Image (spheres, grey):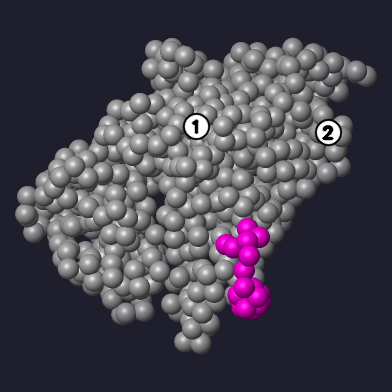
Amino acid sequence: MSAAIPEAENFTQGAVQAPAPAAAASGETFARLLDLHAADRGARPAWRHKDRGVWQTWTWAETRRETRAMASGLAALGVKRGDSISIIGFNRPRLYWAVMAAHALGATPAPVYADAVADELAFVCAHAGARFAVVQDQEQVDKLLAVADQLPELRGIIYDEPRGLRDYDHGQLHDLDQVMARGRERLAAQGVGGEAWLDAEIAAGRGADLSVILYTSGTTGRSKGVMISHERAVAAARSTCQFDRLDEREEVLAYLPLAWVGDHYLTFAQAMVAGFCVCCPESADTVTEDLREIGPTYYFAPPRVLESLLTRITIRMQDAGRFKQWLYRRCIAVARRHGEAILEGRPTPVAGRLAYALGEALIYGPLKNTLGFSKIRVAYTAGEAIGPELFSWYRSLGINLKQLYGQTEAFLFVTAQPDGRARPDTVGPPAPGVDLRIADDGEVQFRSPGMFTGYFREDDKTREAMTPDGWVKTGDAGFFTSDGDLKIIDRAKDVGRLAGGALFAPKYIENRLKFYPNIKEVVAFGDGRADVACFVNIDLTAVAAWAERNNVVYASYQELAAHPLVAELLRQDIVAANAALAQEEAMAPSQVRRFIILHKELDPDDGELTRTQKVRRGFIAERYAPLVRALYDGSAEADITTEVTFEDGRKGQLSARLRVHELDGGQHQARADQVRANGGRP
């Protein structure tokens, strides 16, 4: 693998974690769990969906009826055991029910990212061998029809929303309402006990059957289809529900991509095990408002979402009056000193508790209510490393935010932080039932209850991902702390050394910089080089608000990013981040010396980010090679022309001359002294 990492003792699950819970019952499937919930808690809410401003609710009994109608209708179209079904769209109850209907028939759902461009969609659908696709709307239908010649196995497309599709050729298209109506007729026409054939299909399911094919984000190449069986998925979900004491009283907001393992685990699998209620927002644009209305008790957000929320708060406070700004700063200072200790039940001075209670009444409580976080009992973040300042900021408000480390191949959970043991610099001990070890080259390896059964149609890739003794290689470099918590440094292949021998962990550096509201994305370079340099994307929301307050006029993202005052704004943020890095012995040599503000946002449609918003580092280095050279050859400016993809799929080109910004090492030291005087906080 890559460069060596700090030596530390290796731990396995048994040395640092409570005993694993009992495995799933033999032959347990999600279809059987649905029947159990309908029988045990049939009147309790199972799904909610906001439509035209009104929340609609389906109980577990109603969900079972709807799912069975869908399964019967799909069977009438020709869906049979062993088929693959693509599920494409935003979070909608009926798309989740399509997953359940597939399970009832013994078919395998293979979700696809709703924002995937046609070629990406074609690859996943073709690779999964999808015979049918259940999609949300006209947009997804159009993408499938555009690549129909690449999908020889596709026999039918079932759409949920008919708007715009009336005049299409319906030889291969089917309205989901009509499919379900036909399903109900088939079930009713068979008389009393006529649903026995569907009961028999459900009974024929085995725990070893595939429950889902989840495609990886494709950070380093083509996505791979991760196969997860019913019994392993149920066992994994049950263990973590027990770990966090999740039950039928929880409410969650389903807003993450359907095709992402995080959504399928936290929204679908855990709900199917614990029996709690899943709420689907009206649209991607209303998620913030819908979150506030629902007030979930169990919540997950990638660091990018938490960064965005903090940016909104920062902007609002910058626009507030002087007294409100003063009150906010004073209360947040109290929260930083005492908030986490109070959350974890640690000893806190009486004066600190009183000051915090006042802050709760004046700032923290109203703020959490505005965000929709008032009822949160358990919250997680994962997907990318989170900056320690960002993590501690949320916990200081009394939000029980914890970190987990997961992989699609593990069916998410590899580690998880127990209540009262959340730290910003680690991802916790092994999750229940998980064994962990660190290989000689520093790579993290695991075995887990939800461990995948292999990559679909890629046995060679499965062998590459496994060790000879049955452990899964994560590709991440890390080590255990003295108390058994796992600390992830970076992707193993990305961890390197500066020319002087110091450790270079690009993701760690990037996350330090992304804590600042003006910075949305960062790509750091430095492996084998004398020092660190980076590309930066501005956060348009934050910088545009700053521009409005300071009478800075601009006509486009490109023009705002190129403004000299914006460069100075980001320079100050990077200097502050460097000062924080200077406090860490291992990372002090990795302070940023030069940066370029990119003229466009990094975009999944342009191949620069994955669909889960992870940086495709190698692709970016190749695409922006002239800029990388300029960062290190002493150039003051560099020209770049990049291909961009517009929202309607058309391609175009964007050209710019970008400035290389230098940072003075003396600034770093002065700022470092200021940080040290401030107790280590930027």
Q: Name which residue lies at 59% across and 63% down.
A: 341
Camera-side residue of 12 and 148: 12
Q: Is residue 547 above or below residue 219?
A: below
Q: Residue furthest toward the left?
A: 634
Helix or strand or loop: what does disc 2 sit on? Answer: helix
Q: Main secondary structure of the magenta part?
A: helix
Look at the image and give the residue range highlighted in magenta: 340-362
Vertical placement of 203 versus 415: above or below? above
Where residue 679 sits: x, y (%)? Answer: 40, 69
Whether residue 232 is visible: yes
Q: Amino acid at mark 2?
A: Ala
Ranked by sequence position, the earlier of labels 1 and 2 is 1
Q: Label 2: few (<14), some or many (≥20) within 10 Å?
A: many
| 416 over 218 or under it: above or below | below
Quadrant of the drawing holding the C terminus: bottom left
Left or right: where 468 falls relative to 46: left
> Residue at 49% of width from left, 48% of height from top?
302
For the residues bearing labels 1 and 2, Cβ distance under 8 angstroms: no
Q: Tell me the kind of residue under disc 1.
A: Phe
Q: Which residue is mark 2?
A: 38
Residue 641 in the image, given as x and y percentages of width and height? 17, 47
Q: Residue reaching furthest right? A: 192
Q: Is residue 359 magenta?
A: yes
Q: Residue at x 69, y 59 (%)?
A: 375
Q: Which residue is mark 1?
A: 11
Residue 413: name its quadrant.
Answer: top right
What is the secondary structure assignment of the residue under circle 1? loop
Residue drawn at (42%, 17%), measured in percent from left and top?
467
Taking the image as shown, residue 558 lies to the left or right of residue 75, namely left
